[in-house]
Amino acid sequence: MFHNIRILAARHNVRVISFVENDDEREMLHSLDRICESVIAIQRVPDFRPHWLSVLPFLVREFSTPEMYRAVESEFQRDKVDVLQCEYLQMAQFHRRGVFTVLTLLDAPSANAYEEFREAVDVVQKLRSYYRWMATLRYETLMVRKFERVVTMTENDADHLRSYSPNANIRAIPIGIDPEEFEPWPEKTDQPIRVLFVGNFRHTPNIKGAEFLVERIAPHFPDVQFMISGSHVPDHFRNRPNVHLSGYVSDIRALYCRPNTIVATPLFSGTGQRVKLLEAFAMGCPAITSSLGAAGFPVKNGVEALIADTAEDFTAALRQLVSSEQMRRQLGENARRMIVRDFSWQRIGQQLLDLVKQP
């Protein structure tokens, strides 16, 4: 989102209104001061009260903060607004009539809700997840049809939205990266081989992926350290013999130490593009992922990454990489070339500028 704003601000006057949860996030917003006309931080106050029989999904109520409504209204009153761009489905509630609107969906919430419903076993859980799925699908459908343009990160997500909103203007624009900022650091050949999983553990697919890695893969490699990095790691990941929890890391690049850092992303649910892979590829690290994890990247198995969809295949792929430094180097080099070729902001930036061009 920072780069999206930066690219748009080079041609347009951009005003940003963003939720923050704490003082650290409020301070991070100052990185936009030099490129934006204005930056406003709104303290997020989730509404956890029960809303019986509400047709709105919880993700909408969670972000329905009166102060945000007032801030948006104030900006429209203060000066002319040509384009209103909302990031994530929960922000679609701030849509305004009479202005050109863009909605960016970093994933497909209704597809995620359906997956949760499909996997539910307990009857009560099944009913609750069915309600969440229907509420999310209804709201997502209404919002996709309301905005002039909708952006997804992958063609798979775009096709999902088009399946029930065929007349909507939906474009797939991948997340990019600055290949100069995320450039491979000097090699540390003396570092032991380790397996790295990065994620925000408020996100269910990340929890499931890390559980798969810790419970089904790590026991087969007692001499290899598995590092789980990110915020809000569940307690049941602790006290594993070869699992290290790093917590939040301010500069994620420090984790990608080629050629001996093997990035593992065994993701079997969720939608959107995996930023953790985008960064790992740019940093020249070898990666093992699932078919779903590789969505949005033109990855060929055995060329830019290894793809494995079962515990047996994942274990075999990891054994290959642990035993071959040459393979680790080759995968990392090929992945880096793919990123420079297809995912630099210089290449993607024009698509973002075209997005806000009104007919």
Image (spheres, rainbow, N blue to C red):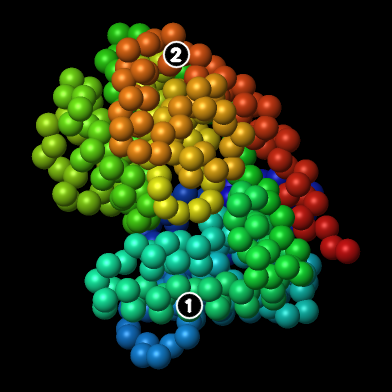
Question: What residue is shown with label 2?
Answer: 327
Asked if residue 306 is positioned above or below residue 50 in the image, the reply reads: above
Q: Is residue 104 left or right of residue 356?
A: left
**Quick one: 323 or 84, which is closer to the camera?**
323
Along the line of sight, the residue nearer the viewer: 269 or 86: 269
Which amino acid does the dot numbered 2 rest on?
Met
The residue drawn where x is 61% and y is 34% is: 298
In the drawing, does residue 77 fall left or right of residue 192?
Answer: right
Q: Is residue 358 left or right of residue 70?
A: right
Q: Position of residue 288 (x, y in %)?
A: 42, 30
Q: What residue did someone put label 1 on?
A: 134
The total number of labels drawn is: 2
Q: Is 193 drawn above or below residue 82 in the view shown?
A: above
In the image, residue 198 lies at what x, y percent? 37, 39
What element does badge 1 sit on?
Answer: helix
- Quadrant where the C terminus lies? bottom right
Q: Residue furthest right?
A: 359
N-terminal of the two: label 2 or label 1?
1
Identify whether 58 is placed above or below 151: below
Residue 45 showing in the rendered view: no
Characterize the local packing of mark 2: few (<14), some (14-19) or many (20 or more) Cα atoms within 10 angstroms.
some
Q: Is residue 357 visible?
A: yes
Who is closer to the viewer here, 348 or 254? 348
Q: Which residue extends farthest bottom?
A: 53
